[in-house]
Image: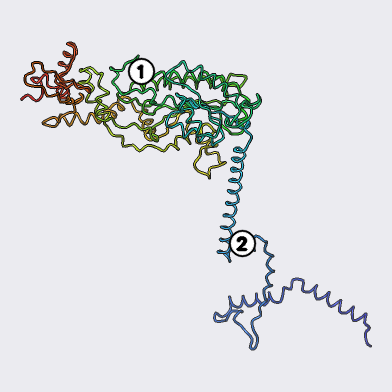
Amino acid sequence: MVPTLEEVEYYLASIEELLWSATPDLPNLHEAVNRLWVDISRFGPQNLPSLQDVHAAGMKAFEVPAPPPPPPPPRSWIERSASWAGTHRWTVGGIVVGVGAIGLFAGYTLKHRHVRSRRAKAANTPHSERRQVIVVLGGDHPLAAALIKDLEDKGYIIITSVATLEAAEALESTTHGYVRALILDPSEPGTVPAFLRSLASTLSRRFPINVAGDPYASPSSHPYIHSVISLLSLSTSLVPAAPTPFEQLEVDNTYMPYLTATHITPIRVIQALLPLLRSSPARARDAASNFRGSRSIIVCVPATDARVGLPFSSAQAMSAAATLRGLDVLRREINVAALTDSTESMKNMKVVVVDVGAVGSTVERAFAQQDLYKAMEDWTPSEKVAYGPAFSSVMEQPSARRPADVSDFVNSLVQVVSGGRKGGVWPFTLGLGLGRFRNWVRGERFAVGAGARTYTLASHLPSSMLDILLSLPQLLISVRNRLLPVIPAITQPYPPPQQPAAPPVIPATALVVPEPTAPTVGKAPSEPEVTIEELSDHDISSDTGSEADVESGGENVESSWIKA
């Protein structure tokens, strides 16, 4: 009997159940074979090959292939750019250099165009918009002409003082109408009130002064004083102070006129201009906020006299010291008042001192022999013996220092006036604020000119060391004279005698012979006309050294060092 389909299926299901129930822990066939082979290898004969080395004939080793790697992710644009740049290095370098050069050129062109447009606008603005006034005291000084010209070119109105009317006309004729020269003789204090009245009248004028029309400006457009620059404290040819020993300095005839011209007159003018500087605090704040510089009082003093004080220049050193101390007090008063003044009229105002060294043609030359004789004409014989050799040694020393250019002096002052915005010599510093940083580093006192910084450093030395350095040449000469067996001849500080004019031929029969005319330059050393007191002093000093013996002119030969 043929079973039905249901019976077959039932039979297979029962067999499957019986099989699974009989072998519940039957392992995998592959694992069982491997376990069997490992057991045989461990416990069976030792020369059996490993299962991996057993291959059936005609069959290859069965290996399960590894799954293929996933496809790489797509690269970003940064990675693609870096890959392209690494492949084309020279091209990338050329592009970077070109873009940088174009950027720098474009930036500098825009900046330079902006600066030129501002300068052109400042030059072409209506006359009433140029309102900042710079008062320059001492416009007839050799350094003033270049300073005034540069200040006018920078957009300022200049009111300067000169001693003579001719100098005022000559100065105004070389400008473009923004310079007004007023008369102020520093040796005559009586000219100060007239100068101040003229200055007050000039502040109501319309600039430039050489154009036609109404000469006076409206009150809303009056110029105002921005800075005061004093060159009167420098050595001037109007009131010269010849080098002379402190003992021989004439206080009434020499020192007082020099002190009046270089100290008293500038101080009086600055005192009178302080109310004008203080009367416009709003304009000062506006100028400071626009980086156009603070109000300033700039006083130039000689570096040698202000810092050190050289021998035989007592008048210059005392005048410079008095000026410096007064300016220090003024600076401190302004700083204190700026902190307590509710009107803010004393803010944005500074006092600056400039130590001027050798600049341009103002360098003093060494004294010639005839100048030495003329400088010592009024000395007493004892002063000639005591100071003559040292005076000659100091005054005849040649100046080997090369003077600085006038433009250095001018640029330094213009930077102070403009707050560092003008007066620079490097175009690439425009807009970087380096001018203001330079003014901050310089402080309220700085040096300009050849030798000024040297004297500034020397002034910080101890006084004993400084005195030794200043007297070092004379010290070496004295040591040399002591070591030599015969002291060299020293130039006498007496003027050489001039031969009188030849007398007319007189017949032998004449009984009266006229005496020749005395020389006009000076008498010979063998015939000094001195008093008994001076002569005694001179004789006493002749025993003190070889220089005094030479200066004695042979009057005390017995006590001289020449005697055996």
Q: Mark 1 falls on what kind of element?
A: helix
Q: Is residue 36 left or right of residue 387?
A: right
- Image location of residue 257, percent across then percent down: 38, 18
Of residue 237 and residue 498, the one placed in the foreground of this image is 498
Residue 11 visible at all = yes
- What scheme was used to colour the molecule? rainbow
Disc 1 residue type (three-letter): Tyr
- Tell me which amino acid carries mark 2: Ala
The answer to whether residue 338 shows anywhere in this view is no
Residue found farthest to the left: 564
| Quadrant of the frame with the N terminus | bottom right
Disc 2 versus disc 1: nearer the observer: 1
Residue 104 picture location, percent across and down? 57, 51
Q: Residue at x 65, y 76 (%)?
A: 34
Residue indicated by mark 2: 82
For the point 25% across and 22% down, the residue is 376
Q: Which mark is residue 276?
A: none
Q: What residue is disc 1 on?
A: 255
Q: CA distance from mark 2 to mark 1?
A: 81 Å
Front in this rendered view, residue 369 or 491: 369
